[in-house]
Image: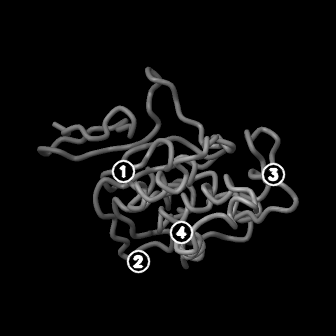
Amino acid sequence: MSYIDGFDHEYIGSLGYLPLYHPIGPIQGDGWAMSDFSADASNLVLGGGSGEHPALVIHHLDALVAFFIDEQFTEQEQEQLKPDDLNKLIDLKSSENIFEFCDWKVRHYAQLQQMAECCAMNSPLTEDEELEDWLASSLGELIYFSLPELCHEYSWFKHLVKDKNIFPSRANIRILPPGYPQPGGRVFVNNKMQWGINYWQNNHKQYD
């Protein structure tokens, strides 16, 4: 049982070997284990913490979308953006502390690098690309197309690209088809535990 299983959360899919979760309510680390972490519904979480894989808590989800959207523009198209829009896009990408690696060891970082470079990924990390940028863009693409409710600046992004055909160039997040048993997610309602809570099947629904 992983640390995140002690809190209500939804299973979204996976990025390579790392499961991707969305907390339903607050997760408050108490410091009992080094791999404990804190998160809430404004975050995404890769890895479930102690008992599974050290967690990567993802903050500033608008910044992730900014990385993905920025890739859609050519250099000439960027120069044609309104100065205020370009500055906002740059500011969002410059957000600090987007990735919070909770109790990761050197081997975990090395394994993440190897996974990102693997040809089994739909869009592997390239030699001239930073791992953090690859990770941000892969997740930002998912948020833009499938999790817009988690993006505060979604309307602005849509306005920014209103004249462009936005293409899902990464597609690195694997999501199980309907009917598959769900490997994660839980809610505790009316003194009853429910497991297998999947974001795509349960989002915006009342748990009972």
**Residue to which mark 2 is pinned:** 31
Mark in the foreground, 3 or 4: 4
Q: Quadrant of residue 80?
A: bottom right
**Residue to which mark 1 is pinned:** 149
Earlier in the chain: of badge 1 and badge 3, it is: 3
Earlier in the chain: of badge 2 and badge 3, it is: 2
**Left or right position of 21 against 102:** left
Mark in the foreground, 2 or 1: 1
Mark in the foreground, 4 or 2: 4
Q: Quadrant of residue 112?
A: bottom right
Above or below 132: residue 175 = above
**Dot label at residue 85:** 4
Earlier in the chain: of badge 4 and badge 2, it is: 2
Camera-side residue of 189 and 207: 207
Tell me the amino acid under the disc marked 3.
Answer: Glu
The CA distance from mark 4 to mark 2 is: 41 Å
Residue in the image at 53% along x and 62% along y = 55
The CA distance from mark 3 to mark 4 is: 32 Å
Tell me the amino acid under the disc marked 1.
Answer: Glu
Question: Secondary structure beneath disc 2?
Answer: loop
Q: Specify few, some or many for label 1: CA neighbours under 10 Å numbering under 14, 14-19, or 20 or more.
A: few
**Dot label at residue 117:** 3
In which quadrant is the C terminus drawn?
top left
The CA distance from mark 2 to mark 1 is: 31 Å
> Which colour scheme appears in the figure?
one colour
Above or below 64: residue 101 = below
Residue in the image at 88% along x and 59% along y = 127
